[in-house]
Image (cartoon, rainbow, N blue to C red):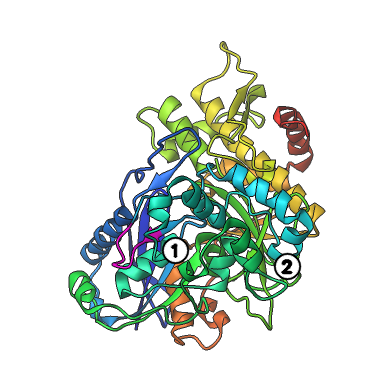
């Protein structure tokens, strides 16, 4: 049997086809080659078209079929990973009512902050494990307040992966994990939070049917199967947000295990069996993919919005004609510390670890006679690594002390400069694996469809590509202390 994984990213949609027995990737492809359109109607807003995602799924699958000979009819199940916290709204005919308000959109920050105070910080943290903040529930409340004619037409709200599953199956479902990332789930009562719905005056009928992450979320519609060249009736057996899915793909499932990514956003994601929360909600706690009411597995998530976005910005302004490997090579020629040039990557919306404030990115201490594009490239990557250290220190203050961090060899982890800066700034070794979101989604589909009796069976062939330990921790701690001078003072 073959497994199909779909990853709905902010920059692109990626698909992978895996052999279920060997867990090897037969083919993978993404669309588009450049970055997907993000519509910015006002400062701090960010929207994408859900129909664009669906079109990109189809185009990426055509590339998969063109790149490697396999029989699409051998695909037996489908898994979906997706950018977290986005809001998709459809009417009774399953037609999209407006563009999706995506994860890095900041318009609902004040709504969420007010809810945190008026619902009671103690209640929110003990029941929701988070402030309502800038998450999906607050975005839905923003639509109700500002676009009442659209709100009145809503049949169901969804996250981006729920939408793609709907396009495949014509069914609309969600999960506890998905509801928790939208801050709809009451962990103490083990049910959708009536208090939050009442506070925002949201209709509970807008919530889709709740099913386990690893379960059938519908079967492939006959017309869609004909469109894609797949077998009608195969299940969508897994749906997860991109960060829980990345953790799954790295076999990070049990307490104490930690994963990281450095794509459009940067994330450290650790698993706990305690209903933990940060008093300031700077890091967030959600139900992990293997969370059940009887066996609680929580994902503690640190997110830095402006990670790959900052690197892309540097490429556009200072790397004309260069690809990312060439940028990394230029950065590698510059000594550690970038000759005093410092960068903070906080220019992609309100940052949760900065208490949902928007500071903008900074480049500081520029020497016009010394600094070259290579210095900028290194300073950007070091600044991102220092941001990870800043966030990890918050996680440490809340009881998470990783002994090793697992990451896929992708995005910024392709850069030796970034990898070394990350391990030396954080003081934590990193294991790199050959994985990405679409392969994780495919393996998740295999687990959900019962191809693998236990999740560990899906990872029995996974081996680390490399193991990197800190070797300049004292130097990078000094550089970090200097970098901290750029951070907003509380």
| Among the 4 quarters of the image, the one containing residue 312 | top left
Which secondary structure type mostly characterizes the magenta part of the structure? loop
- Nearer the observer: mark 2 or 1; the answer is 1
- Picture coordinates of residue 390 (x, y %)? 72, 43
Q: Residue at x 76, y 64 (%)?
A: 126
- Picture coordinates of residue 395 (x, y %)? 75, 54
Give the label on residue 158, or none: 1
**Quarter of the image containing the C terminus?**
top right
- Distance from disc 2 to disc 1, alpha carbons, whole Å, reads 31 Å
Q: Residue at x 50, y 44 (%)?
A: 105
Residue sitting nearer the eye, 299 or 165:
165
Q: Tell me the element at label 1.
A: strand
Residue 443 visible at all: no
Give the label on residue 256, or none: 2
Q: Is residue 475 above or below residue 32?
A: above
**Quarter of the image containing the N terminus?**
bottom left
Give the label on residue 33, or none: none
2 or 1: tag closer to the N-terminus: 1
Q: Which residues are magenta?
A: 89-96
- Picture coordinates of residue 478 (x, y %)? 78, 33
Residue sitting nearer the eye, 292 or 425:
292
Q: For this view, does 58 lie left or right of residue 320?
A: left
Residue sitting nearer the eye, 95 or 398:
95
Q: Residue at x 70, y 49 (%)?
A: 282
Q: Residue at x 38, y 53 (%)?
A: 150
| Among the 4 quarters of the image, the one containing residue 76 | bottom left
Q: For this view, does 341 lie left or right of residue 449?
A: right
Label 1: few (<14), some (14–19) or many (≥20) C-alpha neighbours in 10 Å: many
- Picture coordinates of residue 109 (x, y %)? 59, 44
Q: Tell me the element at label 2.
A: loop
């Amino acid at each position: 049997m073959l497994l199909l994984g779909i990853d709905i990213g902010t920059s692109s949609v990626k698909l992978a086809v895996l052999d279920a027995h060997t867990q090897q990737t037969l083919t993978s492809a993404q669309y588009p080659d450049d970055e997907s359109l993000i519509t910015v109607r006002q400062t701090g807003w960010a929207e994408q078209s859900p129909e664009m995602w669906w079109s990109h799924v189809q185009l990426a699958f055509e590339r998969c079929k063109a790149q490697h000979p396999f029989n699409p009819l051998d695909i037996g199940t489908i898994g979906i990973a997706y950018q977290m916290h986005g809001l998709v709204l459809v009417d009774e005919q399953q037609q999209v009512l407006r563009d999706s308000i995506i994860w890095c959109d900041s318009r609902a920050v004040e709504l969420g902050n007010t809810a945190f105070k008026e619902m009671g910080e103690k209640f929110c943290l003990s029941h929701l494990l988070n402030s309502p903040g800038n998450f999906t529930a607050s975005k839905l409340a923003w639509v109700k307040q500002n676009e009442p004619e659209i709100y009145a037409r809503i049949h169901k709200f969804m996250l981006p992966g729920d939408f793609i599953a709907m396009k495949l199956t014509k069914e609309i479902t969600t999960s506890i994990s998905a509801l928790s990332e939208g801050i709809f789930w009451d962990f103490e009562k083990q049910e959708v939070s009536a208090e939050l719905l009442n506070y925002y005056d949201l209709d509970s009928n807008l919530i889709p049917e709740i099913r386990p992450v690893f379960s059938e979320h519908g079967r492939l519609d006959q017309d869609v199967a004909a469109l894609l060249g797949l077998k009608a009736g195969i299940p969508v057996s897994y749906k997860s947000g991109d960060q829980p899915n990345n953790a799954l793909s790295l076999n990070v499932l049990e307490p104490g295990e930690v994963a990281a990514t450095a794509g459009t956003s940067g994330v450290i994601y650790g698993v706990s069996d305690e209903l933990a929360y940060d008093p300031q909600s700077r890091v967030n706690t959600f139900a992990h993919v293997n969370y059940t009411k009887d066996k609680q597995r929580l994902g503690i998530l640190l997110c830095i919005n402006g990670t790959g976005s900052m690197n892309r910005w540097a490429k556009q302004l200072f790397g004309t004609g260069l690809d990312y490997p060439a940028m990394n090579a230029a950065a590698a020629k510059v000594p550690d510390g970038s000759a005093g040039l410092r960068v903070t990557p906080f220019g992609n919306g309100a940052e949760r670890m900065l208490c949902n404030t928007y500071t903008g990115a900074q480049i500081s201490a520029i020497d016009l006679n010394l600094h070259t594009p290579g210095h900028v490239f290194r300073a950007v990557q070091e600044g991102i690594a220092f941001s990870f250290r800043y966030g990890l220190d918050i996680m440490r203050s809340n009881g998470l002390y990783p002994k090793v961090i697992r990451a896929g060899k992708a995005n910024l982890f392709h850069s030796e400069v970034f990898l070394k800066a990350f391990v030396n700034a954080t003081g934590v070794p990193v294991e790199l694996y050959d994985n990405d979101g679409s392969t994780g989604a495919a393996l998740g589909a295999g687990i959900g469809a019962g191809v693998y009796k236990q999740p560990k069976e899906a990872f029995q062939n996974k081996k680390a590509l490399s193991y990197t330990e800190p070797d300049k921790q004292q130097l990078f701690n000094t550089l970090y202390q200097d970098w901290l001078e750029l951070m907003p003072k509380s």
